[in-house]
Amino acid sequence: MKEKLKIAALFLLLVVLILVDIRILLGLLVLSFIFLKFTLVNEGTAKAVMRMGSFRKFVMAWENHYLDDNYNCKKSKKNKKNKPPFGGLRFVGIRFIDKVYKYKFSWTSITHEGEAKVHKDENLDYIILKPDVYLVEVKEAEDKNLLPVDIKAVVTIEINNPYKALFMIQDWFEAVVHKIKPAVRNFITSDTYENLIRDKEDIGRDITDTLEKENFFKEFNDNYGVSVKKIEVMQIDPPKEYLEATVKPWYRGQEAKARAVETVGAVINMIAEATGKSSQEIQEEIKNNPEVEKEFKKMSQDLICREMALDKGAFLDIRTQNSLQDVIAIWKKILSTGGSNEAKSKTEAKKDDVKDKMKGFNDWAEKNKK
């Protein structure tokens, strides 16, 4: 009986001690969250910790990477044992004394859809260490012919030393862009716009080589802790007026083609109506008769050339040698709308000639019916 009492007493004592330890542990945890500060760090980024306004340390999260004593970012061997147990949770320091550094940063990124997204004076508490792409725009760079063009280039940048990037210069990105833009302008002046748009890939590569030869990349790395990996030209845009002037001839060509199709189709429909046949039958007959096809092509080309040479609504003065062409010419004049009063008067005067010309046309139509 005494033994059982002793065991029960020991058990109760153990329970009390455990409860006390849990309460102490919970108390310590509460105190730690009150007086200690933690932060979450995303993969591939780092945060600077400041103590009373002075830099104290970096906390980072990038698998198989670490910062050496000079804050240079270096690769480490793959080792799963070295992975932090709480993912991106990092200890900052004592609350109200140690703070995560925040700063304003402006840049332009590229979305997954390839569109530009402007970030103006965003408050950041981190710096991206892994390679990332930034958009650099150069306005009104003149080509060899002094044509002003706007260039959009995508620059791939990696931060090698976050301390230099954040604290050795006011704005590392602005400093890099300030060096890249003149190099882009100088390269654009070496060739014409027509050649440049054909070799956009070569432009980025050549600009990269030029900056590297002139030790700009070494300067970026040594002074700003930044490594420029690649420059790619995405767009070269001339002025709106230049584009309009370039596109207008193409539109005129399309309009001329449309007029040609309309003119030839109207002639075939007119012949079909006069002969009592379908348009498809007339087309087949023209196609199957080399002599007729030759004559029709000649006539059509003449009509098309004249149509293309005329302004919309102008008086159509076609002089032809055979009856069919004369009738078609007069038919075009009768259907013509718009133009000047003088043109309309001439058209009305020509209508009287239709009766005389119809005789020859009807003879041709009757012959083709057979």
Image (cartoon, rainbow, N blue to C red):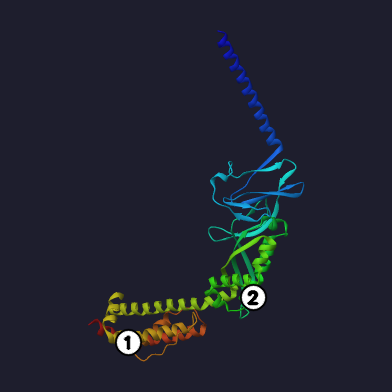
Q: Residue at x 54, y 46 (%)?
A: 80
In the picture of the structure, the residue carrying the numbered disc 1 is: 295
Name the quarter where the C terminus is drawn.
Answer: bottom left
Name the quarter where the N terminus is drawn.
Answer: top right
Amino acid residing under circle 1: Glu
Residue 264: x and y, percent? 37, 79
Q: Earlier in the sequence, mark 2 or mark 1?
A: 2
Task: Tally the numbered discs.
Answer: 2
Residue 212: x and y, percent? 62, 70
Residue 191: x and y, percent? 58, 79
Mark 2 or mark 1, which is nearer to you? 2
Q: Secondary structure at mark 2?
A: helix
Amino acid residing under circle 2: Asn
Q: Residue at x 65, y 61 (%)?
A: 226
**What is the number of the mark on residue 186?**
2
Q: Residues within 10 Å of mark 2 (few under 14, many from 20)?
A: some
Q: Decide which of 295, 86 is in the foreground and name it.
A: 86
**Marks 2 and 1, how far apart in space?**
59 Å
Res. 261 in view: yes
The extreme bottom residue here reads 321
